[in-house]
């Protein structure tokens, strides 16, 4: 059983905070929202947000985080709305609570590697405000402490989810205190026999182990006191989960060197190195066990010196030496110490800012990609092992393992990457495809007239560099299309013995741009250069008595010929014509379709049975699907749900199983039922039918259709 908590237990500490009045207001609001609700433990529901606040207070978080934590269940298990929270507690709090609610409404991916949508939601929460994840981790920790109240299957499911999704996030954010407890609790629920066996072995020897720790601690106290160093020292026996991990990786009990561990805290970084020198002078170090994480921080910004020595009674001890500041960051995470100004922490802040910027970059550049593509980008750029390399000035850069000088250049700035001509690593000229290593000092050589090479796409490791290179060539292609389009048009005019200035007066250009819905003449040239329109078609828009595009199409329609145009739809008799999918009926590949000649928009494709299409209209034109197209299409389905049940998360999950993607979801509330309007991305009608049939079998679903 966990201790039930009330506001009075926290009030003394909270009262010291600058925004105590706002915190008290948030508590009273949450208390009203959760009035009468109980947890499965039997405790009042309000004890959960209070317990989350208590966990977060130990991490030294700011007042906004405390307020949002008190309110984090009020949208999901209350009647609060975003607008109400924003009005009463501000935009930051409202956004954090909304993000937490979205995350809690969805099943995290757990063992399902295909659930990239959920991973995306977690990352979006992080990029918008890292405090969202602090609250989510504290929320899960309190729930894990009380999962004895739920059935065994649910406990195991949540434990797996915690290990697979939340523990790595706690590690990445550097919150060791939460990470360690989540690991132990997860093992306890997943493998209670193994957990208890390790605990029993530890308990059998805990008395003697503590004696060894006390003796070694006293030895170190005497050594450091004599050296005149101010310090604190703690001893511990390694956590159950850490021992399990080592045993699971093939180690035997007597091969685990760091069951006995001591941690020494000092004021200054230089004293860390002095302490390790003193320890090595008195105790023989175990070979190859010294780690300097101060000069080379871990990927989660962790800094400390680690050494393993043969200590008292020839027992093996792991000793960690760090400053108080490093310990705060290691246990509580960088976000709880954002205000520190010291050089070391500034460097760590810069790394965290790089990480957050990387998250934003991936989300922005992959917004329209498939889930598989997005997941690959995440795995490649975030969840890979990282290295730390330096600029000649000593600024540290975090990169995925396997990165090259090109990745380094683009991490500095896109202009540096675009104009890169070579690299010097550790004072040696190296090929640009060289894999960088930890601690490398990298200098990038540039030339203002140089440009990227398309082959770099096969060399770079980071998603950021790949996207910047693609963006450069996309811009270059655009410029080439514009030049090509202008040339094509001028050649056609010369062929017809026409003058550009005569045909394309200012009024004529305005008319063409208006008819084709282009912003400027560069867009027109680009359409010509990419063969979307023929020059003859554009000239005819000006050099004719007809005022409207649709009249030209109707009157000058050629004899039907099927053209081989790289489009989703073939238009009989017309090559390189603009084709749009009608938004009213949203056809997908496999539907029976017709084309409609639309003013200024080329051909609009409708379903044959679309109520907005008159099959006798002279503006209709024959169109057929390009059987070779592999593009996706968007369409709507309408899901009627009985009893106003909120099953949005389940709907997204079910549709995702069919490899479809939900782009947006709206609801229409009726007195006795609810209608979900889901805009989904699919490949064809066959896939659509599979989605509809699958959703129709879900509990509470009364009907599924493409019409409301």
Image (cartoon, rainbow, N blue to C red):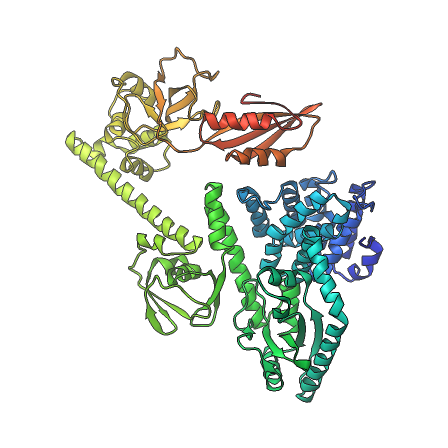
Residue ID at (23%, 28%)? 536
Residue ID at (38%, 27%)? 601
Identify whether 247 is placed above or below 539.
below
Residue furthest bottom as drawn = 226
Identify whether 16 is placed above or below 550.
below
Identify whether 353 is placed above or below 189.
below
- Residue 564: image quadrant is top left
Q: How many marks?
A: 0
Between residue 559 and residue 511, name the one nearer to us: 559
Q: Is residue 130 left or right of residue 359?
A: right
Q: Is residue 52 left or right of residue 257?
A: right
Q: Which quadrant of the rendered structure holds the C terminus?
A: top right
**Residue 18 in the image: x percent, y percent?**
74, 60
**Residue 77 in the image: x percent, y percent?**
74, 40
Residue ID at (43%, 13%)? 614
**Residue 419 in the image: x percent, y percent?**
33, 60
**Residue 689 visible:** yes
Identify whether 346 is placed above or below 485.
below
Between residue 568 and residue 553, name the one nearer to us: 568
**Residue 698 in the image: x percent, y percent?**
62, 28
Q: Is residue 499 left or right of residue 328?
A: left
**Residue 361 visible:** no
Between residue 536 and residue 567, name the one nearer to us: 567
């Amino acid at each position: 059983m966990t201790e039930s908590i009330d506001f009075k237990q926290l009030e003394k500490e909270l009262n010291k905070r600058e925004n105590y009045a706002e915190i008290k207001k948030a508590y009273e609001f949450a208390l009203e929202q959760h009035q009468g609700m109980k947890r499965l433990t039997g405790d009042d529901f309000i004890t959960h947000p209070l317990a989350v606040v208590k966990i977060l207070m130990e991490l030294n978080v700011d007042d906004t985080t405390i307020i949002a934590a008190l309110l984090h269940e009020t949208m999901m298990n209350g009647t609060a709305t975003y607008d109400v929270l924003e009005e009463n507690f501000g935009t930051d709090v409202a956004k954090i609570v909304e993000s937490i609610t979205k995350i809690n409404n969805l099943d995290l991916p757990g063992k399902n590697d295909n659930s990239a949508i959920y991973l995306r939601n977690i990352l979006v929460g992080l990029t918008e405000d890292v405090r969202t994840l602090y609250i989510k981790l504290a929320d899960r920790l309190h729930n894990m402490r009380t999962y004895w109240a739920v059935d065994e299957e649910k406990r195991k499911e949540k434990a797996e989810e915690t290990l697979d999704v939340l523990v790595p996030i706690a590690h990445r954010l550097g919150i060791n205190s939460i990470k360690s407890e989540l690991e132990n609790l997860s093992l306890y629920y997943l493998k209670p026999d193994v957990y208890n066996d390790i605990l029993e072995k530890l308990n059998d020897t805990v008395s003697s182990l503590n004696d060894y720790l006390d003796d070694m601690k006293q030895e170190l106290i005497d050594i450091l006191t004599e050296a005149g160093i101010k310090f604190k020292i703690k001893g511990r026996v390694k956590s159950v989960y850490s021992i399990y991990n080592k045993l699971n990786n093939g180690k035997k009990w007597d091969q685990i060197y760091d069951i006995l561990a001591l941690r020494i805290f000092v004021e200054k970084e230089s004293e860390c190195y002095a302490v390790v020198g003193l320890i090595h002078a008195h105790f023989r170090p175990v070979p190859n066990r010294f780690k300097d994480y101060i000069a080379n921080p871990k990927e989660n910004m962790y800094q400390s010196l680690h050494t393993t020595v043969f200590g008292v009674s020839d027992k093996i001890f792991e000793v960690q030496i760090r400053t108080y500041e490093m310990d705060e960051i290691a246990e509580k995470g960088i976000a709880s110490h954002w205000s520190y100004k010291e050089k070391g922490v500034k460097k760590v802040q810069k790394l965290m800012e790089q990480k957050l910027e990387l998250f934003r970059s991936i989300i922005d550049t992959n917004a329209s990609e498939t889930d598989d593509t997005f997941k690959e980008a995440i795995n490649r750029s975030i969840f890979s092992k990282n290295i730390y390399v330096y600029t000649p000035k000593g600024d540290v850069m975090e990169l995925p393992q396997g990165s090259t000088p090109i990745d380094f250049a683009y991490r500095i700035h896109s202009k540096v990457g675009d104009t890169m001509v070579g690299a010097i690593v550790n004072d040696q000229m190296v090929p640009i495809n060289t894999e960088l290593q930890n601690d490398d000092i990298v200098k990038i050589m540039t030339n203002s007239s140089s440009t990227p090479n398309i082959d770099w796409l096969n060399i770079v490791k980071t998603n950021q560099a790949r996207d910047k290179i693609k963006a450069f060539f996309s811009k270059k292609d655009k410029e080439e299309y514009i030049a090509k389009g202008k040339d094509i048009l001028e050649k056609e005019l010369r062929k017809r013995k026409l003058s550009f200035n005569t045909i394309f007066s200012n009024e004529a250009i305005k008319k063409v741009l208006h008819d084709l819905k282009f912003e400027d003449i560069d867009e027109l040239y680009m359409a010509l250069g990419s063969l979307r329109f023929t020059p003859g078609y554009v000239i005819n828009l000006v050099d004719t008595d007809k005022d409207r595009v649709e009249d030209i199409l109707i009157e000058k329609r050629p004899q039907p010929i099927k053209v081989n145009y790289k489009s989703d739809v073939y238009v009989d008799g017309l090559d390189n014509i603009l084709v749009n999918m009608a938004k009213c009926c949203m056809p997908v590949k496999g539907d029976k379709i017709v084309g409609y000649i639309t003013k200024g928009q080329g051909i609009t494709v409708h379903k044959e049975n679309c109520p907005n299409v008159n099959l006798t209209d002279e503006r209709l034109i024959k169109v057929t699907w390009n059987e070779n197209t592999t593009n996706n299409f968007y369409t709507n389905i309408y899901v009627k749900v009985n009893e106003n049940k909120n099953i949005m998360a389940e709907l997204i999950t079910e549709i995702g199983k069919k490899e479809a993607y939900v782009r947006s979801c709206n609801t229409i509330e009726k007195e006795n039922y609810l209608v979900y309007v889901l805009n989904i991305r699919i490949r064809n009608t066959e896939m659509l039918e599979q989605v509809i049939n699958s959703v129709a079998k879900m509990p509470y679903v009364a009907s599924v259709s493409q019409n409301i």
